[in-house]
Amino acid sequence: MSHNLIWVGSDGPVVLLPLARSKSWYGAAVPCDTLEEGEDYDEDDVEIMPDGTKAVPLEDFDPDDPKSHYEMACALDQDDAAGVVAEHFLAVNSTGEQVAWWPQPDGGWLVRWICADSEEDAVEALKHPPELDWEECGTWALEADGAVLMAAADTVDEQTEEVKLDVELPAGTYALSSAELRVGNTELALVRLTRV
């Protein structure tokens, strides 16, 4: 098993997209046909999403009425480590910190960097973690093999290889749980995906 970490992140949350549905993640844009009557937009602002849907970026963010996928990810309760958005997508409450994938035999861990003296220290803590106090936080269903970890504000086509990570994950239902890992000066927030 490789122990190199590739970190993904932005100023907002990150999202784990099912590979088969990754083109249906619209980031900060909203499909034109879902806008309410009276919500006008300029035709020059219309973007074609990766799945061919016409969408426009929203200017105003209303946490009480999120419309875009990105807004839905941002609207997660700050106490929740992760949550399912629009039925299929797993958003990670990263609060602007970098997130990496750490594979496990029965799934894997989404690892949010909080602090460490070096990446080597973070890897060592992950390789030899102390006993962790895992807290259940729901389930997530992956309909087909494979997922993509990326910044939630963008679409899959807007990303480059440096900020998008293909995750090898078999189809199935995954139990979600979260924990804080602290070893010396290293602190990581974990979301565990365990295939059930």
Image: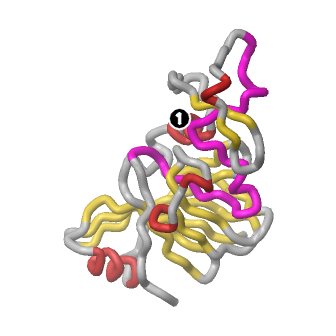
Indicate the position of residue 123 as horizontal and vertical percent values: 35, 79
Q: Is residue 188 or residue 54 the one in the foreground?
A: 54
Q: Residue 109 lies in magenta, yes or no?
A: no
Task: Place residue 143 in its image quadrant.
Answer: bottom right
Residue sitting at x 71%, y 53% = 23
Indicate the position of residue 127 as horizontal and vertical percent values: 40, 83
Task: Place residue 36 in its image quadrant.
Answer: top right
**Left of 84 or right of it: where is 164?**
left
Residue 160 in the image: above or below residue 76: below
SS for callout 1: loop
Name the image quarter holding the C terminus.
Answer: bottom right
Residue sitting at x 66%, y 31% = 46
Q: Which residue is mark 1?
A: 75
Task: Place residue 5 in its image quadrant.
Answer: bottom left
Whether residue 179 is visible = no
**Left of 97 or right of it: where is 60?**
right
Indicate the position of residue 191 as horizontal and vertical percent values: 51, 61
- The stretch in magenta equals 11-37
- Alpha-carbon neighbours of circle 1 within 10 Å: few (<14), some, or many (≥20)? some
